[in-house]
Image (tube, rainbow, N blue to C red):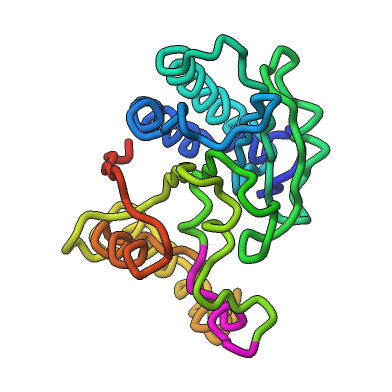
Amino acid sequence: MNIGGVGEVSYARNSQVQRRAVDDAKKFISESIFDLLDIENLSLESSNRFQIADLGCVTGPNTFFAVQNIIEAVDQNYKTKHRNLQTLEYHVFFSDRVDNDFNTLFRTLPSSRPYFAVGVPGSFYGRLFPKESIHIMYSSNSLNWLSRVPNYVVDINSPVWNGNSIYYREELVGKGLMALVLAGRQNGLPLCQTGIGKSFDLLGSCLFDMANEGIISKEKVESLNLPLNDPSEGEIVELINNDWGFSIEKMRHFQAQ
């Protein structure tokens, strides 16, 4: 699929599943922002600047819906709990890989958006933002496409070795929030028994049939690895609680439709 543009095979025209994930998580994220975001004690600049980052924004339009949902929830929180009548000034950082089609992203920005938009190309394996600059960090349907932690990240001699901290913890302001929406599975349920697992089994069967007919080589099929991981809830909890400087305040499982 051609990720860029707005043609028939573009991400913008073929991302209904990702859009449903945004819609399914809307109420949960909105409630979490209202309950957990300490807007009265949050570190805001004198201009009341509130900064949001979407990691893995692709080309839209799903990122625009997600950002709008977050802003509406923050507005409700701010107007309900804060005595300062000054309105918030929103800055939204749309971030994705350097080969992302940012031209399409910015051409299709909503004309009446209540925020200033900034593009941030780069991998979230590295540093993307200044220290303590982001109030809410959001990512949807991006993290599950990491098959494993890259070797250079866990190499103590690597220039990107984080030691006792990770970038996200440094980039979030004190009392900031991170909201992650990703594909997963229930505890104890093997991937092969999930809908996506069964789809991959079917795909593998088709590829081996093609190899048996000489259309592609068996070696190519056997060497194929999909860069996808659908972790269980327990695996997510174990990872987050592994002294990364974060705590899980709320977690909810949504059934894929």
Residue at 42% x, 45% y: name it: 181
Please tell me whether residue 187 is drawn above or below residue 85 in the rendered image: below
Residue at 60% x, 74% y: name it: 215
Measured from the top left, where is residue 46 in percent x and y? 68, 27
Residue at 55% x, 46% y: name it: 173
Measured from the top left, where is residue 175 in percent x and y? 45, 43
Q: For the stretch drawn in magenta, what is the main secondary structure?
A: loop
Left or right? Give the position of 77 relative to 241. right
Measured from the top left, where is residue 109 in percent x and y? 73, 25
**Viewer-proximal residue, 143 or 159?**
159
Residue at 48% x, 73% y: name it: 148
| Quarter-of-image position of residue 188 | bottom left
Please tell me whether residue 164 is drawn above or below residue 186 in the rendered image: below
Observer able to see residue 213: no
Left or right? Give the position of 15 relative to 12. left
Is 1 within the magenta?
A: no
Please tell me whether residue 61 is drawn above or below residue 174 in the rendered image: above
Report the quarter where the C terminus lies: top left
Region of the chain picked out in magenta, as a range: 146-157
Left or right? Give the position of 37 relative to 226. left
**Viewer-proximal residue, 141 or 133?**
133
Measured from the top left, where is residue 168 in percent x and y? 55, 57
Observer able to see residue 77: yes
Is 156 within the magenta?
A: yes
Left or right? Give the position of 139 relative to 257. right
